[in-house]
Amino acid sequence: MRSKGRIQVSEPGTVVLRMAPRPENLALARLALAGVGTVAGAGESDIADLKLAVTEACTNAILHAYSDGASGQLVVRYRVAAAGVDIEVEDDGAGFDPSDPIAEESERDGQGMGLMIIRTLTDSIEIESDDSGSRISFSKRL
């Protein structure tokens, strides 16, 4: 997968979580975000929006990238930016076609609102996906 625009671990204000793609790890992603949001000066409402967005992105990876039972790693990167918070959720599971409208509508398993929710709650979103995994990057300006 390309690394265009990727948050670099060496950047100041960056936190990286590497975890197994399991539902019980969603709490870790949300807790880390609460800390990063506080450092960034985000209000409770902005932190709540970002918690929902990161939960949706991680849940999509858990449900769809690893739906065939494959093991892998879920990586969540947070960066405190000059005017907000940047987040990336990356998996090494099955990719998808981000230009396919099915990816953003009620589709597989009667779900599929995750990307639409992320778009609504954040100021920008970028999606990259291929057969080596997917990366969803989004930002919230404060």
Image (cartoon, rainbow, N blue to C red):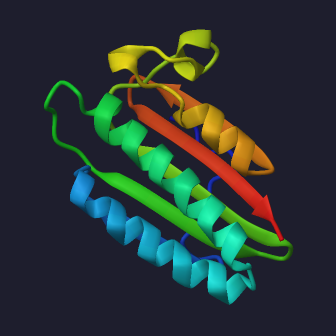
Which residue is pictured at 65% across the width and 76% down the height? 11
Percent across and percent down for residue 99 are 64, 15
Percent across and percent down for residue 140 are 76, 60
Percent across and percent down for residue 112 are 48, 25
Visible residue check, residue 83: yes
> Is 111 or 92 nearer to us in this picture?
111
Q: Which corner quadrant holds the C terminus? A: bottom right
Going by the image, does 127 lie left or right of 66? right
Which residue is pictured at 33% across the width and 29% down the height? 64
> Is 84 or 120 nearer to us in this picture?
120
Visible residue check, residue 13: no
Going by the image, does 39 lie left or right of 84? left
Q: Count all numbered tags in the image, as a single digit.
A: 0
> Is 97 or 45 nearer to us in this picture?
45
> Is 101 or 94 nearer to us in this picture?
101
Percent across and percent down for residue 15 are 51, 76
Please tell me in which quadrant of the rendered image residue 49 appears. bottom right
Please tell me in which quadrant of the rendered image residue 78 appears. bottom right
Going by the image, does 138 lie left or right of 54? right
Which residue is pictured at 59% across the width and 34% down the height? 115
In the displayed structure, 51 sits above or below 56; it is below
Please tell me in which quadrant of the rendered image residue 81 appears. bottom right
Going by the image, does 53 lie left or right of 61? right
